[in-house]
Amino acid sequence: MAKGYWITFYRSISDPEALAAYVKLAGPAITAGGGRFLARGSAVKAYEQGIAQRTTLIEFDSVELAIAAHESPAYREALQALGNACERDIRIVDGLG
């Protein structure tokens, strides 16, 4: 079974304190759902239309587990803490293989 990857690109952050509250809740919610953080932080270099902003890459054993983690009650609580503190793009994709 192919792994699943949850990728988040932060376009802008307007409330760093709300983001910090989100991170405290989201990290444990994601790892409880089987997620493993592979990369997290500001982009070192951005090309083409990319924005050198915060990015996260999380690996799951399957796409289904990634979706379930995103839809979990614990992650919904993290989203409530985040509110409108940032503009971001989240994608869950199949791994190769």
Image (cartoon, grey):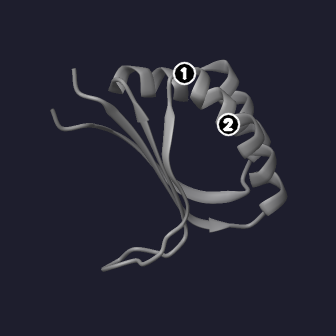
Q: Residue flagged by tag 2: what amino acid is it? A: Ala
Q: Would you name the residue on which mark 1 appears?
A: 33
Q: Residue at x 60, y 60 (%)?
A: 87
> Looking at the picture, how far across and down is residue 42, in whole percent?
56, 68
Which dot marks residue 26? 2
Few, some or many C-alpha atoms within 10 Å of disc 1 (few <14, some 14-19, many ≥20)? some
Q: Residue at x 30, y 80 (%)?
A: 48
Residue nearest the viewer, comparing 57 with 50: 57
Q: Residue at x 72, y 53 (%)?
A: 84
The answer to which image quadrant residue 74 occupies is top right
Q: Does 58 sit above or below residue 31?
A: below
Residue nearest the viewer, comparing 91 with 40: 40
Q: Does 60 sit above or below residue 13?
A: above
Extreme residue in the right direction: 17
Q: Residue at x 18, y 38 (%)?
A: 96
Judged from the image, the secondary structure of the residue bearing numbered disc 2 is helix
Q: Does 5 sit above or below residue 69?
A: below
Is residue 90 rendered to the left or right of residue 48?
Answer: right
Which dot marks residue 57? none
> Looking at the picture, how far across and down is residue 15, in whole percent?
79, 62
